[in-house]
Amino acid sequence: MTLLSWILLFSLLGGVLSVVAAAVFLLLPEVLRTRLLPHAVSFAIGALLGAALLGLLPHALEALGGNNFHNITGTLLLGLFGFFLLEKLVLWRHCHHESCEVHVPEHGDHHPAAGTLILIGDGIHNFIDGVLIAAAFLTDVHLGIVTSLAVAAHEIPQEVGDFAVLLHSGFSTGKAFVFNLLSSLATVVGAVLAYYSFKNLEPVLPYILAIAASSFIYVAVADLIPGLHKRVEFSATIKQVLLIGAGVSLIYLTHATLHN
């Protein structure tokens, strides 16, 4: 199996399959959906942080070696700042709940512009995910698989939120699915372009990995964790901690198993 085949397969996994999974999730009874979504978000937090801190950053630091560690940490810092600016422009922000104060207008009024905005933001987000997946595979196939798993874990609750925004914006269920599916193909486009752009630029890859890590850390810490703080009951906190730990454990065990 060629490296490009691996990249295409897992960029599709992170993009298209997450849309299908989210569509199936939305068919569940609302009570069950409301109960499961926070658990999926908690698990995604663990997967994102695990992939960033146990996979991407160590590989980036190892690839540079020597005394260039500050270059990687500086790139990580710039990446966090860049994603903060993107969120300020409402291009990066995604909804991980079925009600979203950013994209859904007050009083539940239909607002087609909100749906268009979420599709543009989703397309950019998915394109960047594809670039990051390709960069990880170009560094190490095992790292690419771990990175793709983290992307998929995050994409499913994100796509549920995006579907809700599109439906609130007046899209029919079928139209929301088709447009979200087309937007998810940006993952594949980003991955293919990155493959042909980076395959002969090995010295750049550690910095791309650092940006990937900053993306995962920012989404987990700024976008997902604040939502967990809305549940302050002890039982909810225990479940959140366990599921975050499960997400980290999945990444750790996958990484350890593949390398052995």
Image (spheres, grey):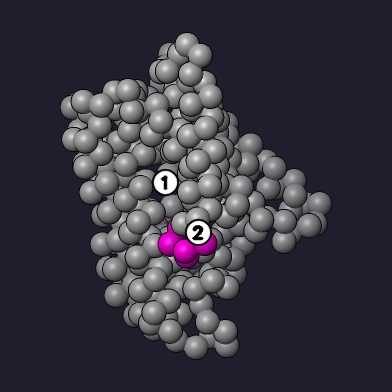
Q: Is residue 23 left or right of residue 228?
A: left
Instruction: Specify the segment rendered in magenta.
Output: 87-92
- Report which quarter residue 91 is drawn in: bottom left
Front residue of 103/179: it is: 103
- Determine which quarter of the picture holds residue 132: top left
**Quarter of the image with the C terminus in it:** top left
The label on residue 152 is: 1
Q: Residue at image x 48%, y 26%?
A: 71
Image spot of residue 126 (x, y percent): 35, 52
Residue behind mark 2: 87
Residue in view at x 68 percent, y 47 percent: 240
Mark 2 / mark 1, whichever is N-terminal: 2
How many numbered dots are placed on residues in this image? 2
**Dot 1 amino acid type:** Ala
In the image, residue 22 sits, relative to residue 108, either above or below, namely above
Q: Main secondary structure of the magenta part?
A: loop
Residue 113: x and y in percent read: 39, 79
SS assignment at label 1 = helix
Assess whether residue 178 is covered by the magenta stretch: no
Residue that protrudes farthest toward the top in the picture: 66
Mark 2 closeness class: few <14, some 14–19, many ≥20 residues within 10 Å: some
**Callout 2, which amino acid?**
Glu
On residue 16, the disc is none
Instruction: Let me know if residue 136 appears in the view.
Output: yes
Observer-side mark, 2 or 1, equals 2
Mark 2 vs mark 1, CA separation in Å = 21 Å
